[in-house]
Image (cartoon, rainbow, N blue to C red):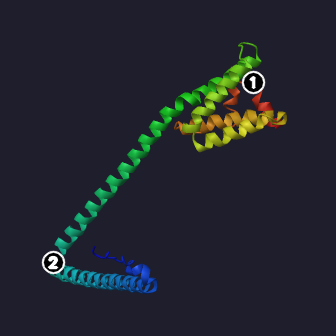
Amino acid sequence: MKGKEVSEVKAPFSERHPKIDFVIGLLFLLILIAGGLAALYYAIKHIGIGISILTDWLAETASKLDAVVIVALITGAVSITGVIISSILGKIIEYRKARQDYLAKKREEPYTDFIDMVYKVQQNTKGTTQYTEQGMIDDISRFSKTITLWGSPRVVKKWVKFRGNGMNPKAAIDNVFLIEEIMNEMRRDMGLKKVKKGNLLAFFVNDIKSVIRNK
């Protein structure tokens, strides 16, 4: 019977000599960094030389050209630059206009719902309609959901303030004017100008001028 052959499996070099392996790895990393820096230096150096040669060539060529040709070249370059800039500005304006139109369409329904809600409350105080508390809560909830996505930051900010003042009876008059501020911000989102204080409230508050004077 032959004797058993025992084969010893040696551990990897990195496990048997971790310190030496670390030093080798560090040296390799330093060599790579040094090589990269050297390549970057020579690249920058040659780019600078290329720019210098190109500048000298342009200066020499320009000195040989007739003044009329130079003026024509400059005029052409300016014209091309103007066309490029005009095209870029046109695309930016076109994009902004398309974005504004898109948002206006999305905001039209919730903003109209808000105006309807205000008029419902006003008519309810006169007893001409039956606008229940549950109906008002449902309308407020629906409006809040829609402006969560489509309301502008200014409308959202003033709506949050309006909701916060709703729990304070002393802020009732302030909330009336806050409604007008919200409507003005909505007009602004739809591309319209802000109207004078009290003009929108005058549609459903008869004595608004006296309220403004006493405020």
Q: Position of residue 193 (x, y in %)?
A: 57, 39
Q: Position of residue 214 (x, y in %)?
A: 83, 36
- Quarter of the image containing the C terminus? top right
88 above or below 110? below
49 to the left or right of 18? left
Q: Residue at x 57, y 29 (%)?
A: 110
Q: Is residue 192 visible?
A: no
Q: Secondary structure at mark 1?
A: loop
100 above or below 128? below
Q: Position of residue 179 (x, y in %)?
A: 69, 33
Q: Is residue 66 visible?
A: yes
Q: Secondary structure at mark 2?
A: loop
At label 2, counting other C-alpha atoms closer than 10 Å, the crowd grade (few under 14, some 14-19, many 20 or more) is few
Q: Which residue is mark 2?
A: 65
At label 1, counting other C-alpha atoms closer than 10 Å, the crowd grade (few under 14, some 14-19, many 20 or more) is few
Q: Amino acid at mark 2?
A: Leu
Estimate the spatial distance between the alpha carbons at disc 1 and disc 2, rounded to whole Å. Answer: 80 Å
Q: Amino acid at mark 1?
A: Asn
